Image (tube, grey):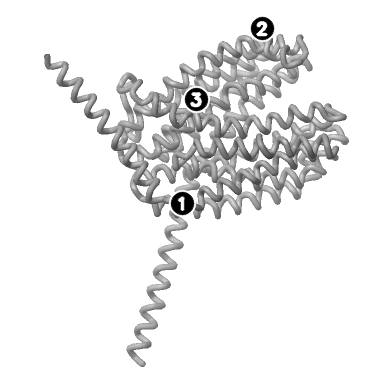
Amino acid sequence: MDEKGENMEKGLLEKEKEKESIFSKVFDEVKLLGYIGGPMVIVNMSQYVLQIISIMMVGHHGKLALSSTAIAISFSAVSGFSLIFGMSSALETLCGQAYGAKQYRKLGILTNTGILTLTLVCIPLSLMWSYMENVLVFMGQDPIISREAGKFSIWLIPALFAYATLQPLVRYFMTQSITYPLLLSSCASICCHLPICWALVFKSRLGHFGAALSIGFSYWLNVSLLLLFMKFSPACEKTRASIFSNLFQGVAEFLRFGIPSSLMICLEWWAFELLTLLSGFLSNPQLETSVLSVCLSTVITLYTIPDGFGAAISTRVSNELGAGKPRAAQFAVRVILCLVAIEAVIVSSSLFLGRNTFGYVFSNEKEVVHYVTSMAPLVCATLILNSLQGVLSGIIRGCGWQDLGAFVNLGSYYFFGIPAAAALGFWLKMRGKGLWIGICSGCFLQIILLSIITFFINWEDKANLARKRVFKKRSIEENGLSEHNNSSLY
């Protein structure tokens, strides 16, 4: 009996130790995810807020200035910024796995390659922006508004090149879990943007075109601060690389991940923009477009929270796979799914409780506010879906499955969600609610497919593939370097 009693006590003690170790692991993982995800929420929101501040100031220059600026920013987001943002997401896989495998120099080389490639991509995009007036007129927009929007887009071109430099730098710091410079530079750019935008819009001859110039200035300020930190901080000493070091060697690898990354993000982004466009064909287009714009702005603003979580889990998964630790990557996925479920409930519940008032933030018209209130339950459901989708997409990016994610988004939204939205909105005459339910159904299908993919991930194989890719690339670079050294002897 004594021996049995001692064995039972030992068993209980071991179980308690196991529970304590699990709780400590969960706590450490939550702390690490919060350390990465929290600042990324502010970083993502700051880049969106810059455009909102500019639109708010331009609104005091009259309806023509406001409408042309809104159209120009929306068109530039769809045709330029979304492409750059999507392509830069390839670095979440490449840089994250390189850092996890302790190939620090390669991380710097990949960042430089990303900046070069995206800068080259900006050249044809800027040419397209210079003809935005003709494109908008061809699409049936008012010629006067199109002319002003075309001029605004030309003044916005410097912001595009700044954005192409900023996004790889953000991934460079994020994949190393160095988030405080991102936080500081984002806050500094917002603080400087307010007086600069006000001065250029109201005190210069540029008028509302000054808002476009101020966006570019704020982005370049953000870039400058991050470059200074990279240059002089000891935290970046291992990962800094010469600007011309193997610069063109990684372009093909970057494009191999960058193009599907861009498709994955843009297909989803464009689907929600198309929702606003479809609302213009309903029976009361002014009301429907206004309401859906309010709902969409609310969703985009609050989406920065799960998007930050998505960036955090992408970093954690890519780091652990690169380090050859598949179980740690799988554990991080389980923790983030629990966290995002809690976040989704809190945010959606808060919005639902304030459903009678949040419409007044965007409009004083009672008809619009009442319609927004009736849409609130659907918006809350969308927030829950977007929270799950944001994290699942981050997991896919961390694993390097952007091509598969692009096919999922294509099928979910364009083969199912948008046709369902059109059928509910126009055929069943459910108007804006029908359009929103349809696009939500596409998001729901997207979550189901991404969940199935995540559930069946073979983490051991993904870790092996990640390390093979990283070290294969390293051996190629070393061979190229040795050949260069040998040839220089003769």
What residue is drawn where x is 44% and y is 39%?
400
Q: Nearer the viewer, residue 279 or 410?
A: 410
Which residue bears the numbered disc 3? 222
Q: Disc 1 vs disc 2: which is toward the camera?
A: 1
Q: Earlier in the sequence, mark 3 or mark 2?
A: 2
Give amino acid for label 1.
Ala
Q: Residues within 10 Å of mark 2 (few under 14, many from 20)?
A: few
Q: Nearer the viewer, residue 203 or 88?
A: 88
Q: Residues within 10 Å of mark 1 (few under 14, many from 20)?
A: many
Whole-percent x, y for residue 360 in the image:
80, 36
Give amino acid for label 2.
Arg
Which residue bears the numbered disc 2? 205
Q: CA distance from mark 1 to mark 2?
A: 53 Å
Whole-percent x, y for residue 205 in the image:
66, 7
> Callout 2: helix, strand or loop?
loop
* Residue 444 vertical placement versus 218 (above, below): below
Looking at the rendered image, the quarter that the N terminus falls into is: bottom left
Label pair 1/3, CB-CB below 8 angstroms: no
What residue is drawn where x is 45% and y is 41%?
398
User: Does 318 sit left or right of 270 as displayed?
Assistant: left
* Residue 80 vertical placement versus 428 (above, below): above
What residue is drawn where x is 36% and y is 26%?
250
Q: Earlier in the sequence, mark 1 or mark 2?
A: 2
Which residue bears the numbered disc 1? 332
**Residue 202 shows up from this direction:** no
Q: Disc 1 vs disc 3: which is toward the camera?
A: 1
